Image (tube, helix red, strand yellow):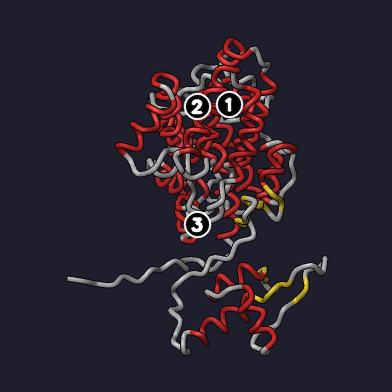
Amino acid sequence: MERMLQSEEAARRLGVKVATLYAYVSRGLLSSHPEPDGRRSLFALAEIEQLAKRRRNGSRVETGLATITTGVTQLRDGGPYYRGQPATELASRMTFEEVAALLWETEVEGDWTPPELGTCPLTLVSDRMRWALVMCGANDPMRADLSPGAVIRAARRVIAALTAVAVPAPGAAGGLGASIAMRLAQGLTGAAVQLSTGRDADEWAAALNAALILMADHELATSTLAVRVAACTRADLYDSLLAGLATLAGPLHGAASQGAYELLVNVERDGASRAINAVLHRHENLPGFGHKIYKEGDPRFAALWDLARPVLSEERCELFLEILERAAADGVPQPNCDLALAALSWGTGMPPDAGRTIFTVARIAGWTAHYQEELMERPLRFRTRAVYSV
């Protein structure tokens, strides 16, 4: 089947505005094809690539370089769209398991039981999760099976295993029959939420479920690209996910919400103005604010905050709103999803690294979808040329 691009993606591939794209159509340089609903136009990827080559004055295209075309996630002004559906809406009406099935294009039913891995000797949650991933692979006698069914079964086991090692004590995750969100919620907070807010488990599990969905994928983020590079060598799912975890470990990626968590702790201790001023004195940016893609504000923030807000105590909710007002008055960019994730973690008594834990478990779903997609491409297609200097 011929691969098609929407007008915005076609224009971006050519490096022109959408209006210029349609000017090419009127001049006969491109052909447009209506979508089934007739409201938008599609363009053939092959034709777009041919035109791009001609616009480079016919220069030879390096055949070893990769062009990544994906049907997993598209970033729009309204946030990420998973398989054409807005993640901000999915977060309020679907479970994380259902969204994973959507990303993987498979049935919702499946076994989410973690394998028996033994006792983890490590202390830090991030280390325990890497250990669990390595052990999942080591205990899978069919790890080299790259068929769709085998990959999906492995992904479910990995998500369940990472969830299990993230909780502080055996049995704290609400039982293996519980959803991934409920296992994480009860494991990361215990009775802390009920003691501080009086809310029941269902409310804060719903908020955590939304967080998992909103963090599940974000197109070709750095860690996702690492997974796809490993997949192009036909590494198995476990090793490819390990490449993603290694990239996620950077403080500028998976741990971004922890900086926002620390900001909230400092605001609670010192007051909003003093804490914000202290951070801006040391750093150019305020953790949890601004986004390279969403210049007008991260839509995922509002979607998660709407569900996290009822879980916070009245006092902490008022304090959080004060932070937003103070930041807006100081001309700080609008809040992003890391701040909402930090608010959920801080407001429900989760540990400071809970945001990284939630982010990691969630992103396994998106990475797996990209891994599956990469297996459909030619192997070893990623080859970046260096510019040698002395």
Please state which amino acid type lies under the numbered disc 1.
Leu
| Left or right: 356, with 142 as reference point | left
Measured as percent of width and height from the top left, residue 299 is found at 61, 45
Disc 1 secondary structure class: helix
First in sequence: mark 2 or mark 1? 2
Asked if residue 233 is positioned above or below residue 209 in the image, the reply reads: below
Any mark on residue 94, and which? Answer: none
The residue that appears at 60% across and 37% down in the rendered structure is 212
Q: Quadrant of the N terminus?
A: bottom right
Instruction: Report how far apart the C-alphas of labels 1 and 3 lie in the structure.
Output: 27 Å
The residue lying at 68 percent from left, 75 percent from top is 43
Residue at 82% x, 65% y is 37
Q: Quadrant of the C terminus?
A: bottom left
Where is 335 relative to 223, above or below?
A: above
* Mark 2 to mark 3 CA distance (whole Å): 25 Å
Residue 28 on image: x %, y %? 68, 89
Badge 2 vs badge 1, beta-carbon distance below 8 Å: yes
Residue carrying label 1: 184
Q: Quadrant of residue 201?
A: top right
- Nearer-N-terminus badge (2/3): 2
Name which residue type carries label 3.
Arg
Closer to viewer: mark 1 or mark 3? 1
300 vs 122, nearest the viewer: 300
Is disc 2 placed on a helix, strand or loop? helix
Q: Which residue is mark 3?
A: 228
Residue that label 2 marks: 166
Estimate the x, y position of residue 63 in percent, counting from the top left. Answer: 46, 78
Q: Nearer the viewer, residue 77 or 251?
A: 77
